[in-house]
Amino acid sequence: MRTPTLILATFILTTSLPALAQKPPLLPEKDVAALANELSGETAKRNLEGIARFHRQRGSSGFHSAAELVAERLRAYGLSDVAILQFPADGKIFYGTQRSRPAWDAEVGELFEVGVSAERKIASFEAEPVVLAEDSESADVTTGLVDVGDGTKDSDYTGKEVKGKIVLVAAQPGAVQALAIGKYGAVGIVSYAQNQKTAWSGENENLIRWGHLETFSPNKTFAFMVALKTARAMQARLAAGEKINLHAVVKAGQHPGNYEVVTATIPGSDAKLKEEEIAFSCHLDHQRPGANDNASGCVTILEVARTLQKLIDEKKLDCPARTIRFIFPPEVEGTMALLNSPLHFVSQIKAVIHMDMVGGGPETEAVFHVTRGPMSLPSFVHDVAWAFADWVNEESYKFAATGAAEYPMVAPEGGKEPLRAEYSPFSMGSDHEVYQDSSFKIPAIYLNDWPDRYIHTNFDTAANIDPTKLKRVAFIGAASAYFLARMQSTSAGDIDLETIANRLRRAAWMIARQQRIPSDGPGRLVEQSNYENGVIESVRRFAPDSAYALNRAIEAGAGADLIVSGSGRDVELPEATGSGVLKFRRVGFPKGPLMVFGYDYFADHVKAAGVATPKLFGYEGLWGSGEEYAYEILNFADGKRNTQEIRDAVSAECGPIPLELVAEYLEVLEKIGVLEKIK
């Protein structure tokens, strides 16, 4: 095969992309106009303000109240099959690889400084629920405060008497729980852990980050979260020799409960296709206020539900052939319960549109992404989403630059700046990775903001949410779902031009990477070619009898091998030897990713088997860390690829990785019963 040149990449980018039509893609313009006119960013934001009132932790009374609010709105909007499904969560039941976490509720959480002229309140759960770390247990303690720095290593405690005291730590409470509480005998934790690392981390000293204790730790305790400004003042006083005594009062704890999943449908009209579903997904749980993360995703799909149902009822849109389903679960663990239930969701859902953080306005510094699926699961559905997002980019930029556009999709109470959505490679971090795991193989369009300077803090408020952005994202989601729900063999050709354009876009991107990092070898280009062929083949899930006229022409014609042609340099892929020839495939159970929310199936089973943690988890690739490699290595272990081919596949996606790290991880997966070796 041949490796391409950078000249070809430039040619693709400069000749194919401007050919994208200025008129709306994929759908008749009357349908696009109906959606654009009806979708309301203001309605979405009013619903967001309602949800953001609740502290909606898993299984809690706050989550139940939010679920009831969403269900009430769905009923008011006229949707069908509205229900709040319940899945027991007691710490013992497993849903695939997810060990159910008991529900957690809190009534009281107050932290005072005592021994001064007047008792001074430092933190109050009633005023700001984020100050009490999730999974805190009840306590009534008055004791001294000891600063132990990060608190994550033994040396942090050297020479310090922490037994019976409260420790002040820079790390998340769960990261210090075993040492501080279990080994050194502290009775509680005060944490000033900073937010996820971005350019703005530590810039605002008043941010209070959402904190977590380890759900299944035997070292039960409580933890309060404080702002960096508060912690620095405490540290200065302690360093000067002053004693600080704190009084902590907590009424909280775990208890058997339920994961609650709100769901509703717009039933399909085709006798054969109505059992197939296009699903909208989000996650309803979070600390209060949790506006962008993730009340924004919840209310955006709620607005899609309202709009589609209204337009169908008014006969401004035809009823879709497939059913459209809306799902509001607790993050990851609710999705795991749903997909591992006997309710046939896995067999019914053909594609998912997942929204997690989609409303961040200028203050959040957010960049909006239309994120593709992993290379292990090629699908054309991402081309559908990007077709609409790219068109919204064009229309919104035209409006911002000139003051005039046919479809600006600007909300009266929102901003007027362009959307500037980015078409991004796969990244992890939400429920989309569950759907696209090799257990389920459901392609997911992931719509998300990153970075967000206020994620997981008390400043993630409704004030930072832009109604214009909610409207535009709702349009991308609604248009994508409506196209997919209507798509049949006779209309499959509608997607061909978009698939071609994005095939070339991805090829150019991969070619440019190959030129910069040639040491990665030709395997990357082979895998990109395999991926693109898989994208074309994925159309069969929706249109098994389609002629694929344009795609067939590409495969047979001059453009068939743009990805791997160009320079005339012939390359030979090395033949696999040794451990590289081994093949593995996944066993049937348990289903789901191995590292899920609040529970690490892999670590638990490696420990039980007495196996050392693979070196893979300390590896940093160019575009992925050990966790991303591990996710895709398991997905690629299909019994057809050998170890070397799996290495080539994950190298194409995440950056070069030594064969021995991949081989070691596969062997460990076999030892803990996740994979079986093909003889």
Image (spheres, rainbow, N blue to C red):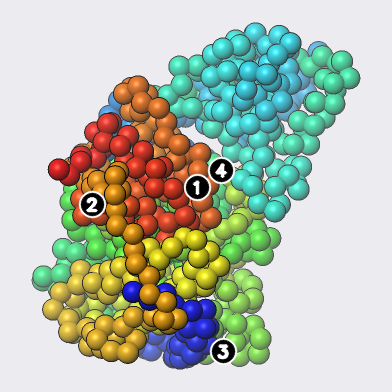
**Three-letter code for the amino acid on which mark 1 is drawn:** Ser
Q: Is mark 1 on a helix, strand or loop?
A: loop
Query: In the image, 41: left or right of 304?
Result: right
Q: Which residue is denoted by mark 1 in the rendering?
A: 625
Quadrant (top left, top right, bottom left, bottom right) of the N terminus: bottom left
Disc 3 is placed on an element classified as loop
Q: Earlier in the sequence, mark 4 or mark 3?
A: 4
Q: Which amino acid type corresponds to the residue marked 3 in the rendered image?
A: Ala
Mark earlier in primary sequence (2, 4):
4
Residue beneath disc 4: 288
User: What distance separates the C-alpha of mark 1 from that of mark 2?
Assistant: 22 Å
Q: Point out the tag, 4 or 1, that comes first from the N-terminus.
A: 4
Q: Residue at x 76, y 42 (%)?
A: 205
Viewer-proximal residue, 450 or 605?
605
Tell me which label, 3 or 2, sits earlier in the chain: 3
SS at circle 2: strand
- Residue 638 shows which numbered tag? 2
Type of the residue with mark 4: Arg
Q: Mark 3 points at which residue?
A: 405
